[in-house]
Image (tube, rainbow, N blue to C red):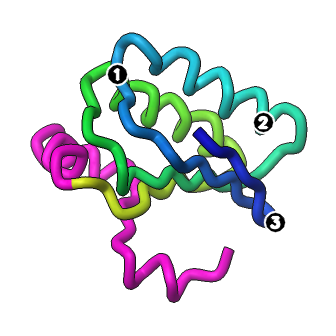
Amino acid sequence: MTIERHRDTLRASGIKELHAANAAAFYEAIKEAITTAPVRHIEIDLSGTALLDSCGLGTLVALRKLVDRDCGVVRLLNPAPSAHQMLELTRLYRVLKVVKCEEVAATPS
């Protein structure tokens, strides 16, 4: 996993799986990066994420709570089909902003 900072946004990419076995470590890595240098928004590139389970979804919601107090947003970038299906089945697309490739190119960081 790669974590990069772009102005007031933290971007995580290279996440192949987000599930019970690694969700806590993922959360802690993001939280530590935010604690080191605060940001307002979090972008998570899910384009290569083949597995996303309920623990992974819970982690994404927990990250939203971290930035929500500063009126920040969690953006899920280009979710892979299986991840997108989980977001639709759980209706979490209503809570977390899902952004497709065309929109990412148009959105300044």
Disc 3 is placed on an element classified as loop
Q: Is residue 105 above or below residue 39?
A: below
Residue 104 picture location, percent across and down:
48, 77
Residue 19 has which mark? 1
State which tag comes first along the sequence, 2 or 3.
Answer: 3
Determine the CA span between mark 1 and mark 3: 29 Å
13 with respect to 97 (left or right):
right
Quarter occupied by residue 78: bottom left
Q: Which residue is mark 3?
A: 7
For label 2, the residue is 33
Mark 2 and mark 3: Cα distance apart in space: 13 Å
Q: Quadrant of the N terminus?
A: top right
**Within the magenta stretch, is there residue 71?**
no
Image check: 17 left or right of 32? left
Q: Are marks 2 and 1 in contact (CB under 8 Å)?
A: no
Query: Residue at horizontal 36%, vertical 56%?
Result: 47
Residue name at image x 52 percent, y 15 percent: 24
Left or right: 60 in relation to 90: right
On the image, which quarter does residue 61 sit in?
A: top left
Residue type at mark 3 is Arg
Callout 1 environment at 10 Å: few (<14), some (14 to 19), or many (20+)? some
Cα distance in 3D space between marks 2 and 1: 20 Å
Magenta segment, which residues?
81-109
Q: Secondary structure at mark 2?
A: helix
Residue 86: x %, y % from top left: 18, 41
Type of amino acid at the residue the image marks with label 1: His
